Structures are given as C-alpha cells and as structure tokens.
Image: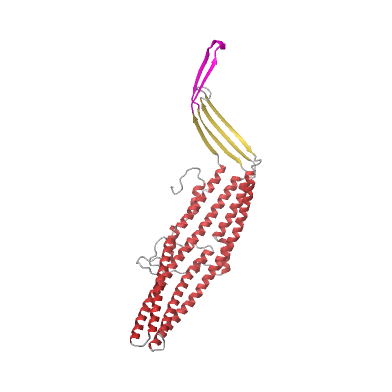
C-alpha cells in the first residue's frame, strides 16, 4: 500500500515516527514526570528514620521599675529602682524517633510499591502512545490511498461521461445513459471530498500523536513475528506480565501497607529529645545561662475519638477494592487480547478476500467495457463494474491497514509493545535513574535535572 503525501520531503517510516512519539509525546512525558513525582514518596517515608533538628533564637527588651518604702511608712521616703534588660538567647533541639510500631517501615514499603506501580503505569502509557502512533500512521496511509483511488475514479468517470455524451450525439445511447453517468460522477466527486476530509482528520491525529506533519510515509509491515504463536500463549503472556495488571497488583500492596500504617497510630511510640539553650539577661543584667537536657518520652494513645479506628476500617475497605480491581484488570486484558487476536485473524482473511475481489472486479470491468462497445452491455453496467472495482480496492487498502494495526494491538494487549521490543532508534527512558538520584537525598530543593 503506497502512502505519498502532498509535499515532497524525506520519506518517513513507521519506526522513525514511533521513535519520535516515544521521545516527544506530551502524554508520555507527562506520565514520566508523574513517576518522578512518585519517586519522592520514598525519601519522604525514609525521613521517619532520621532526626528532626530545629534551631530557635529570640531577642527582646524589658523594663522593670520597683518602688518600695524606705524605713517607716510615715517617713515618706521610697526606694525606686529601674532595671533595663535585653533578654535574648538561642537554642537547638533534636528529636529522634526510637519506636513507632512499624509506621515508618511500612510507609517506606508502601512508597516503594507506589513507585513500582507508577513504573508499570508508565509502561502501559508507553504502549498506548505507541499504539496510537502506529494507528495514526496507518490511518494516514489508508486515507491517502483511498483519496487517490477516489480521485482516479473521478477521472475515469469524467472520461466515461465524455464518451457517453459522444455516443448520445450519434444516437448510440439514450439520455438516460448520460444521466446515469452524470449521477455516478457526482457521487464519485462527493466521495473524493469525503476522502479528503478523512485524510485531514487523520493528519491532525498524526500530528497530535507523533508531533510532526506526515510527509511521504513509507509502507509499514505488521509485527506478527513478535507475537506468540497461538491465542492461548498470548493470553498466558498477557495475564502474567501485562503492565496494567502489574500496576494493579502493586496497588494492592500499597493499600495493604496503608492498613498497617494507619493501625500504628493505635500503638505506643518512643522518642528522644535533646535540647541545648544559651540565654542572656534573663533575670538581671549580664547573666549568662547555658542549659542542656535529654528526655526520653513514651506516648501511649488511650482514646482519640474513634478517628484512627475509622481510618483503619476505611483502609481495609480500600485494600479490598484494590483486590477486586486486579480481577477487573485481568478480565479487561483477557478481553483485549481475544479481541485484538480476532481482529488480526479477520484482517488476514479480509486481505485474501479483497485481493480476489480486486482481481475479479478488474477482469469483470474489462469484459463489460468490451461488451459495451458492441452493444451487449449498457452504460449502467459499465458504471456498476467501475464502482465495484473502486470498492474492492478500497476494501483491500482498509484490510491492509487493519492487519498492521491489529498486529500492534495484539502486541499491546499482551504487554510487549515497547521501544525495546520494536528496537526503535530512540534513547530509552530509564525511570530507575531518577529514583536512585533522589532516594538518599538528605537536603536540597533542586531536582536532579537542575530545576
């Protein structure tokens, strides 16, 4: 199937288009940013193991005036004193968690499950983007070919109408034959306009998914060599490794750990706080006090109004919901594999049937034209044979497109549609790199890429 575009330019292949989509598609890049944001949950959870250090400083001014009687009250003398102080000081406190009933440990495990789930979701998004890219690529090829067929059909029918009018002038056909040719030409022109509109829509989708305008697209081949040999094997592979199912399973892990994180609020906690303070002018001018303390604290929750119990029950229900969602996701994947596999098999059969139809229609049209020349066929017979040939060729183009798209759909349904599987010439995105960069960071607001 050919796929030329209006403006001359270097030819574009399916692999190059998908590589560009893999590198620059905004939906995929947004999901990568989402994964990087989820990565930050791990250092946040790990902070529960680390001390909290706070520094404080204060400064002020105070005036104290005292007026006390001197001697007997009848003497009328008083002692008046005025004290002006500038109380100030600074201090540092360190708080270290010793025991929190496993809340920090479970929070770390939960955040790591969230990271793994986000990576699986990213792989699924990558699949969807690549499948959309392959589909839009094939849609442009299909609609370009169909537009070419319809424009060629208009040219053929224009010539047919000219010949019919000439034959009408010499009395070989009737006015009805001319009207039939005119009607069929108008219908063909309408179909050409519709085909052009469909092509514009496909070009817009191509631009959305790939990021550039299509130019001289080369024919694409199905990726059936990358698929399992049978439907049962495809189902086994999909149910065992599809990223959507893996993401759902990590969602279950995170939800179950959330139950433990919430329950930890019902248990005692132990912590240690150390404080050092330096004070000046606290009670009289020139005094200087240094104090230090270390205090261990045991906190035992007695009753918190039922909030923690409610949150625990809520977390358990959420975990149950996540388990059900895994079953739902498995059913969704199974249905997608069966549907895509059936679509691929149907497209193969349609190509064989369409090729036979094109061959037969071409033979029939040639025969009808020859018979019409000797008066054994009417103009309507010729027009019908021409229309059948155009329809057959359009069906063949559509079936060829459907086979390629269906092969990519099967690859996506089993969870193997990726840059690595297709061996695209694009730099592979490795989410673990960012995770390793931020996991152990103790301070700093700048992201690893400099923002």
Quadrant in the rendering for residue 191: bottom left
Decide if residue 425 is in sight here.
no
Residue at image position (55%, 55%) is 117
Along the line of sight, the residue nearer the viewer: 335 or 191: 191
Q: Is residue 346 in view from this perspective? A: yes
Where, quadrant-wise, is the N terminus in this rendering? bottom left
Task: Say left or right for 432 vs 160.
Answer: right
How many labels were placed on the picture? 0
Look at the image and give the residue range highlighted in magenta. 60-87
Question: In the rendered image, which quarter is residue 363 located in?
Answer: bottom left
Task: Return the residue found at the far right.
Answer: 302
Give coordinates of residue 275: x percent, y percent. 56, 33
Q: Nearer the viewer, residue 432 or 446?
A: 446
Q: How is the image coloured?
A: secondary structure
> Which residue sits furthest top?
75
Task: Looking at the picture, tell me which residue is in the foreground, 427 or 340.
Answer: 340
Residue 381, position as x, y percentages in the image: 42, 84
| Drawn side of residue 289 relative to residue 21, left or right | right
Whether residue 18 appears in magenta in the rendering, the answer is no
Q: Is residue 93 left or right of residue 355?
A: right
Report which quarter residue 145 is drawn in.
Answer: bottom left
Q: Is residue 112 above or below residue 139?
A: above
Residue 108 image point, x, y percent: 57, 48
Across and down, in percent, residue 156 comes to 37, 78
The answer to if 81 sits in the magenta stretch is yes
């Amino acid at each position: 199937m050919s796929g030329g575009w209006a403006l001359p330019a270097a030819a574009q292949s399916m692999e190059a288009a998908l590589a560009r989509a893999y590198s620059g598609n905004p939906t995929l890049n947004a999901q990568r940013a989402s994964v990087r944001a989820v990565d930050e949950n791990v250092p946040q959870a790990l902070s529960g193991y680390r001390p909290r250090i706070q520094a404080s400083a204060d400064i002020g001014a105070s005036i104290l005036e005292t007026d006390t009687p001197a001697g007997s009250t009848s003497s009328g003398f008083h002692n008046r004193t005025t004290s002006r102080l500038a109380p100030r000081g600074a201090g540092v406190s360190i708080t270290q968690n010793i025991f929190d009933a496993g809340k920090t440990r479970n929070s770390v495990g939960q955040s790591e499950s969230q990271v793994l789930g986000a990576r699986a979701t990213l792989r699924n998004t990558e699949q969807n983007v690549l499948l959309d890219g392959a589909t839009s690529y094939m849609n442009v090829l299909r609609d370009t070919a169909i537009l070419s067929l319809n424009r060629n059909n208009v040219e053929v029918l224009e010539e047919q109408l000219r010949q019919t009018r000439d034959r009408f002038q010499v009395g070989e056909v009737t006015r009805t034959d001319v009207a039939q040719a005119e009607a069929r030409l108008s219908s063909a022109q309408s179909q050409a306009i519709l085909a052009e509109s469909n092509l514009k829509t496909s070009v817009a989708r191509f631009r959305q998914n790939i990021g550039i305008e299509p130019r001289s697209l080369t024919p694409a081949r199905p990726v059936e060599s990358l698929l399992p040999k049978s439907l049962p094997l495809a189902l086994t592979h999909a149910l065992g490794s599809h990223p959507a199912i893996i993401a759902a399973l990590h969602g279950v892990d995170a939800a179950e750990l959330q139950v433990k994180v919430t329950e930890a609020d019902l248990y005692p906690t132990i912590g240690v706080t150390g404080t050092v303070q330096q004070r000046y002018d606290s009670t009289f001018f020139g005094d200087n006090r240094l104090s230090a303390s270390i205090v261990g604290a045991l906190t035992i929750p007695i009753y918190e109004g039922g909030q923690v119990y409610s949150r625990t029950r809520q977390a358990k229900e959420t975990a149950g919901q996540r388990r059900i969602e895994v079953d739902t996701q498995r059913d969704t994947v199974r249905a997608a594999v069966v549907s895509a596999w059936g679509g691929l098999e149907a497209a193969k059969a349609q190509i064989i049937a369409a090729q036979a139809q094109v061959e037969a229609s071409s033979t029939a049209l040639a025969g009808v034209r020859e018979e019409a020349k000797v008066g054994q066929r009417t103009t309507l017979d010729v027009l019908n044979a021409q229309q059948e040939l155009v329809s057959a060729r359009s069906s063949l183009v559509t079936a060829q497109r459907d086979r390629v798209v269906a092969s990519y759909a099967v690859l996506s349904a089993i969870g193997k549609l990726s840059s690595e599987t297709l061996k695209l010439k694009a730099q592979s995105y490795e989410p673990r790199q960012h995770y390793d960069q931020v996991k152990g960071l103790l301070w700093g607001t700048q992201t690893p890429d400099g923002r």
